[in-house]
Image (cartoon, rainbow, N blue to C red):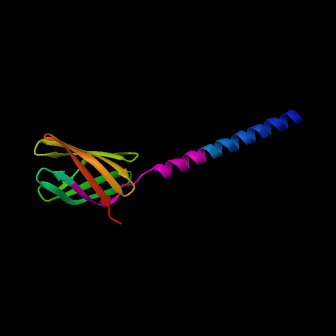
Amino acid sequence: MMKQTNFLKNKLVLGVMLIMITVGLTSMKTATDYDPSGTWDYEVEMAEGTMSDQLTISKDGDKYEVSIETTQFGTLELSNVELNGNDLSADVDMQGATIEFKFEFDGDAMKGTVSTPDGEIEMTAKRRK
């Protein structure tokens, strides 16, 4: 009888530990899931000077949509938007050329690069409160 009680107690302890680990991992995952949604004021340093406007990131289910307001090209709707941790990548087809965006978020700040056929351009942004 004593052996069976220890066996059941060990199974119970093991079960409780598994539940605690599962809950811990689940809460850790949600704590590290970054949501870049919002309106961002961006700046791009160009040869012609600093270009600035707004970038909007919205969440639709588990997908993100990104639009960038520009004086020169109007509103750009980015495609192939992927968020991996705090890194977001996307692209847009402009006049037959693919422009790639890579953003790295740190809270309400973002820095990134825009890869064009003419080279890479640095981009920074701050999220509006």
Verify whether residue 12 appears in magenta.
no
Q: Residue at x 62, y 43 (%)?
A: 21
As drawn, 57 above or below 4: below
Residue 20 placement, left or right of 86: right
Rendered-image quadrant of the N terminus: top right
Residue most extreme to the top: 3
The answer to which quarter of the image holds residue 82 is top left
Residue 108 placement, left or right of 119: right
Residue 31 is at least partly visible in this image: yes
* Percent of width and height locating residue 104: 34, 48
Q: Which residues are magenta?
A: 22-43
Rendered-image quadrant of the C terminus: bottom left
* Percent of width and height locating residue 103: 30, 48
Residue 1 is at least partly visible in this image: no
Q: Residue at x 79, y 40 (%)?
A: 9
* Percent of width and height locating residue 63: 35, 50
Q: Residue at x 37, y 58 (%)?
A: 108
Q: Nearer the viewer, residue 58 or 45?
A: 45
* Percent of width and height locating residue 106: 38, 52
